[in-house]
Amino acid sequence: MSTLAVQDHGVAHHEEGHEHHHDTFLTKYVFSQDHKMIAKQFLITGITMAVIAMLLSILFRIQLAYPDKTFPLLETLLGRFAPEGRLDPEFYLSLVTIHGTIMVFFVLTAGLSGTFSNLLIPLQVGARDMASPFINMLSYWFFLTACVIMLSSFFVQKGPAGPGWTIYPPLSALPQAMKGSGLGMTLWLISMVCFVASSLMGGINYVSTVLNMRTNGMDLWKMPLTIWAFFLTAILGVLSFPVLVAGVVLLIFDRSFGTSFYLSDIVVNGQVMPFEGGSPILFQHLFWFLGHPEVYIVIMPAMGISSEVMSVNSRKPIFGYHAMVYSLIGITVLSFIVWGHHMFITGMNPFLGGVFMITTLIIAVPSAVKTFNWLATLWRGNIRFTPAMLFAVGMVSFFISGGLTGIFLGNAALDINLHDTYFVVAHFHLVMGSAAIFGMLAGVYHWFPKMFGRLMDEKLGYLHFWLTFIGAYLVFFPMHFMGLDGVPRRYYAFTEFASMQRWLSVNMFITWAAIMSACAQVAFLYNFIHSIFWGKEATQNPWQANTLEWTTPVERIHGNWPGEIPSVYRWPYDYSKPGAEEDFIPQTTPLSETMSSNVPHDFEDNPAGLEALSKWSSTQKANEEVK
Amino acid sequence: MMATIQQEDKVNLGAKKFIMWIFIFTSFMLFAALTSGFIVYIGGSKAHGLNITLPISFRYSTLVLIASSVTLFIASRSAKRLDFAKQTTMLWITIVLGVAFLILQVYGWYTMAYKMHIYLVDPNATRSFVYVMTLLHVLHIIGGLVWLISALSGSIKRIPQVKNLYRMEMTSIFWHFLDIIWIYLYVFLLLNQ
């Protein structure tokens, strides 16, 4: 006991030293090295980028619904990009490209991992900050630079990049191929290099922090599933982003120095280009070696967040904790050997296609394990429908309905029909777009008190959830049928093709559903901004959760805990444990304080504890008999 | 009290060293991607072989880089044995060898372009790969030199031993890795020539 007291004294003194050093506005809000502030910076930048990308999607949805109508307002807003109030066809391609790029990379990679890995890794493993706070700060500034460069491409003469978010050469490699392959494409590449640098700095920090800076008692099997998900996501990023860099470097050489890595036998405007011997398929291999793990980089943090939120709000331990971790590991490993399923129609050897098909379909196993575990967690739980909980359940719903179509697309034979149709659009918007964004929103509603010390308004949260949830299904569900009918994606005007004309009315329906969901985000934005300043003040542990972040004070101090970092004695999912006084037992409560709820399983590697438990229960029994 | 704080700091330095290890993984993935790209490219057509003899200066640069690893190892050992004068000298030698490596690589490009008339732009992109791989490796070497210089300045300024060792270790991890990755690239190219 005396040692403890001495240590406490020491740490208190140490903290005083901290208080003497005053933060200026610049060091506190701008060049902050505090992981919580960096998380907020990522979140707010991510939300801003999401709103921009959403508005872009509304623009091209208007074009799809009313290909022949003119909207003078559009010309006022967009100028030369919408001559006479109709979107320019090449600008339409740019819109699709930038919408995809921003959503996949800037919102669902940086906005999601950047926010919640930064916020939760130190808080939930019990660390004062990241392994390298400075690199962490750099990570944000590279991200912001990438955002600015990406958006600046709207202000160049020829407009932003237009070859699709996958930037396949030769289209992306020849600046003269179309407007969107010019300066806009160069800016895209520069922006992505900054973005990859940012992701790598972030990812390296996350991995190192999780492995090296856990508090006493926090072994890997006591980590919340959020941390497992962020950790594995970071590993995926660290291993796959460099491959994208390699692909992009070669593309830059092709674009700017005249090499022929990807180019061969090309004629532009009747002129034969000097490129020979290149292979555009090489780019697809390099791109999808990143690109496929990337979709798991997007979805795994959402899975982790949903697991945590659903367990807390069902007041039940997560069903199959170990299975959840092993399925995440399974997804991580498998994601590196399935990239070929994006390339079934590149003339790939059918045998190789078969191999990729099998590996792809195997991913259904860990995904199904996770899905069933979520459902079993909900099963007979004492459910509290907070907005965060609704979004987490919504994430599961989208993951199921989008995941099922993945089984269709993973089949090489079926994919030949479905490739590049709206079926694919529907599939990935549900399984990774909507599911991941719902996971992210669940996280925002759940950890808002940890970020800003206040609560978000519940009623607006419910409005936001239902409109977005219904809206997303109304938007993406009909697209499956368009895809089955063979309607290709990225087409500018459905009126130009007789076979596609009958889908115009559906397009109109989808566009109005999209506008409705976009309006629903106003409820969120208002709620978010209003609650930062005027929301209800939060208590220390508003959701009665077990994890470590709720043991920190409401005023978010530098170093997270005022005194010593708490030690951890149990896993994070002791909810509604029979015999316990309350329906949650924080990770910091030692087993010795909860004798009435301990079970032999709690002492697997601890014979002394087991003995203490049996002694305790025999005394209990003896006492009963005396009575 | 001091013990607690020092312990926390020590843990943190360990985490930072770990960051270097992970960075090495990312870097390795970059070169692995380039070499696998090379293999995929060669597989595309029978005409796609390297079919050149690599410039002799690459062989010398390999030897120089290996020598620099040895001197850096000696520098690290001297730092641990508190022989700071030797550490400084050995770091100087390592830096000189590193710069010599850079010069030899550039000379290799010069030989390829001006003597052998094999340019970056070539319809057979395997040859362009040689330039890109060596260029990316040279960029890493420049980063490695920055680390070496920071270690050297630490050694000259006699910074606290904990920090001195930390810088030495970070530098060593990175520099030895660059050595290994160059041998990997060189052997890879030799096998394909």
Image (cartoon, helix red, strand yellow):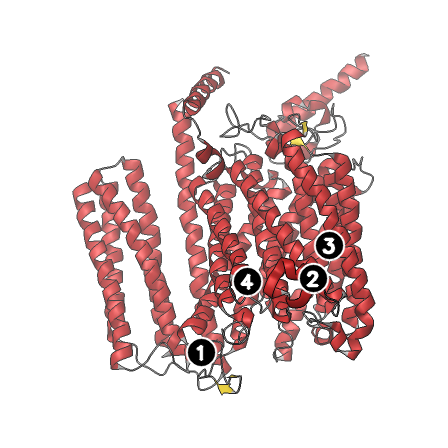
Tell me the SS state at disc 4.
helix
The chain carrying label 3 is: A
How far apart, in angstroms, are the residues tagged by discs 3 and 1?
41 Å
| Label 2 vs 3, first from the N-terminus | 2
Q: Nearer the viewer, residue A77 or A143?
A: A77
Residue B116 point in image, percent of width and height: 27, 82
Tell me the SS state at disc 1.
loop
On the image, numbered disc 4 is attached to which residue? Answer: A290
Q: Amino acid at mark 1?
A: Ser
| Label 3 vs 4, first from the N-terminus | 4
Label 2 crowd bin: few (<14), some (14–19), many (20+), radius 10 Å? few
Q: Are marks 3 and 1 in contact (CB under 8 Å)?
A: no
The chain carrying label 4 is: A
| Label 2 vs 4, first from the N-terminus | 2
Residue A260 is labelled as 1
Q: Is residue A49 above or below residue A360?
A: above
Tell me the SS state at disc 2.
helix
Tell me the SS state at disc 3.
helix
Residue B174 point in image, percent of width and height: 35, 53
Q: Nearer the viewer, residue A95 or B51?
A: A95
Label 1 crowd bin: few (<14), some (14–19), many (20+), radius 10 Å? many
On the image, numbered disc 3 is attached to which residue? Answer: A399
Label 4 crowd bin: few (<14), some (14–19), many (20+), radius 10 Å? many
How far apart, in angstroms, are the residues tagged by discs 3 and 4?
21 Å
How far apart, in angstroms, are the residues tagged by discs 2 and 4?
41 Å
Q: Amino acid at mark 2?
A: Pro
The chain carrying label 2 is: A
Q: Are marks 3 and 4 in contact (CB under 8 Å)?
A: no
In this rendering, which labeled residue sits more in front, label 2 or label 3? Answer: 2
Q: Amino acid at mark 3?
A: Phe
On the image, numbered disc 2 is attached to which residue? Answer: A72
